[in-house]
Image (cartoon, rainbow, N blue to C red):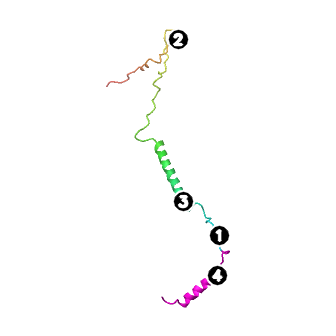
């Protein structure tokens, strides 16, 4: 082993003198650290997990609520097929009350008039 250099001897003497100045009363008892309970990494993880969950829920809701283009909704009927067309009043020689068609009978076909012209 080599002998210590004068700088090393001076450094050891200074550290030894400093260590003799500290006694047991100067040392503080052990206390746990009092920093933020949640670290920034944990907060970022929670926020990103919530954002991903909200985005997935929004995508599912959009897909479920926006009807599929392959299955178009049927168009409503032009008229209610359960009701008969309104009865037209036709002058008759009968003075009795007008008769109404039965709701179970099929609707009468409207008269067709042909106005085609022949050339």
Q: How far apart are marks 3 and 4 (CA)?
A: 44 Å
Q: Position of residue 103 (x, y in %)?
A: 47, 18
Q: Is residue 87 magenta?
A: no
Pick the front one: 38 or 101: 38
Q: Position of residue 22 (x, y in %)?
A: 65, 78
Image marks 2 and 3: residues in contact by CB distance under 8 Å: no
Q: What element carries label 1?
A: loop
Q: How far apart are marks 2 and 3 (CA)?
A: 86 Å
N-term-proximal mark, 1 vs 3: 1
Q: What element carries label 2?
A: loop
Residue 6 lies left or right of residue 77; in this view the side is right
Q: Main secondary structure of the magenta part?
A: helix
Residue neighbourhood size for the residue with mark 4, other residues' Cα within 10 Å, grouped as few (<14), some (14–19), many (≥20)? few
The residue singled out by tag 4 in the image is 20
**Front label number (1 vs 3):** 1
Residue at position x 51%, y 54% in the image: 49
N-term-proximal mark, 3 vs 4: 4
N-term-proximal mark, 2 vs 4: 4
The residue singled out by tag 2 in the image is 97
Pick the front one: 49 or 24: 24
Look at the picture and state if 89 lies above or below 65. Answer: above
Q: Does the magenta stretch include residue 15?
A: yes
Pick the front one: 25 or 97: 25
Q: Which mark is residue 29?
A: 1
């Amino acid at each position: 082993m080599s002998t210590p250099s004068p700088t090393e001897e001076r450094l050891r003497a200074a550290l030894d003198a400093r260590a003799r100045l500290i006694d047991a009363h100067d040392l503080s008892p052990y206390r746990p650290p009092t920093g933020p309970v949640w670290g920034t990494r944990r907060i970022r993880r929670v926020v990103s997990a919530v954002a991903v969950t909200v985005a997935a829920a929004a995508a599912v809701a959009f897909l479920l609520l926006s009807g599929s283009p392959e299955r178009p909704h049927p168009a409503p009927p032009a008229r209610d097929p359960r009701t008969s067309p309104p009865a037209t009043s036709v002058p008759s020689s009968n003075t009795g009350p007008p008769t109404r068609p039965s709701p179970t009978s099929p609707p009468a076909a409207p008269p067709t008039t042909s106005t085609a012209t022949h050339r």
